Image (cartoon, rainbow, N blue to C red):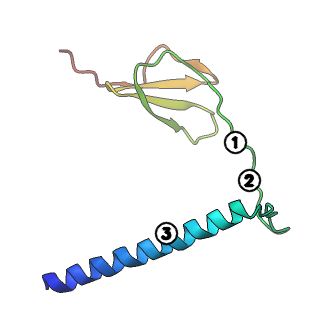
């Protein structure tokens, strides 16, 4: 059983090396030969622009942000230490949604 597994692993490595070599050769040949850029097909999907926007600050090690998904535009920010804050229309509410900080 071990020999069969070793043969499959060796075969997989060879295939990966061959495919890598073909890919590198293709990339190098197009780069060295001065290939022109390729335009997207006319029916290709276009993605909307994506950007980042800071909506609040002052958190201590935030690890997750979730939307309320209820039409209120509220966001819940989870801090690593166990506090969940609520952001309502860009304002951090003074009372946390949940506080699970364990006193030391």
Are there few (<14), some (14-19), or many (20+) residues within 10 Å of tag 3?
few
Give the numbered dot on residue 50. Answer: 1
- Label at residue 47: 2
In the rendered image, residue 9, in percent from the top left (x then y), is placed at 28, 77
Q: Is 45 situated left or right of 91 in this image?
A: right
Sequence-wise, the earlier of marks 2 and 3 is 3
Point 21% across, 81% down: residue: 5
* Image quarter of residue 55: top right
- Return the x and y of residue 16 as percentages of the image width and height: 42, 73
For label 3, the residue is 20
Crowd rating for badge 2 (residues with CA inside 10 Å; few <14, some 14–19, many 20+): few
Secondary structure, mark 2, is: loop
Distance from the alpha carbon under mark 2 to that under mark 1:
8 Å
Quadrant position of the N terminus in the picture: bottom left
Question: Who's the residue at 49% across and 15% down the image?
Answer: 58
Q: Residue at x 50, y 70 (%)?
A: 21
């Amino acid at each position: 059983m071990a020999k069969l597994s070793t043969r499959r692993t060796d075969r997989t490595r060879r295939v990966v090396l061959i495919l890598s070599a073909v890919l590198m050769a293709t990339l190098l040949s197009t780069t060295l030969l001065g290939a022109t850029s390729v335009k997207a097909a006319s029916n290709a999907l276009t993605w909307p622009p994506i950007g980042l926007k800071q909506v609040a600050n002052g958190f201590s090690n935030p690890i997750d942000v979730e939307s309320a998904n209820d039409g209120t535009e509220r966001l819940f920010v989870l801090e690593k230490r166990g506090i969940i804050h609520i952001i309502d229309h860009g304002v951090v509410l003074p009372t946390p949604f949940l506080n699970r900080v364990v006193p030391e």
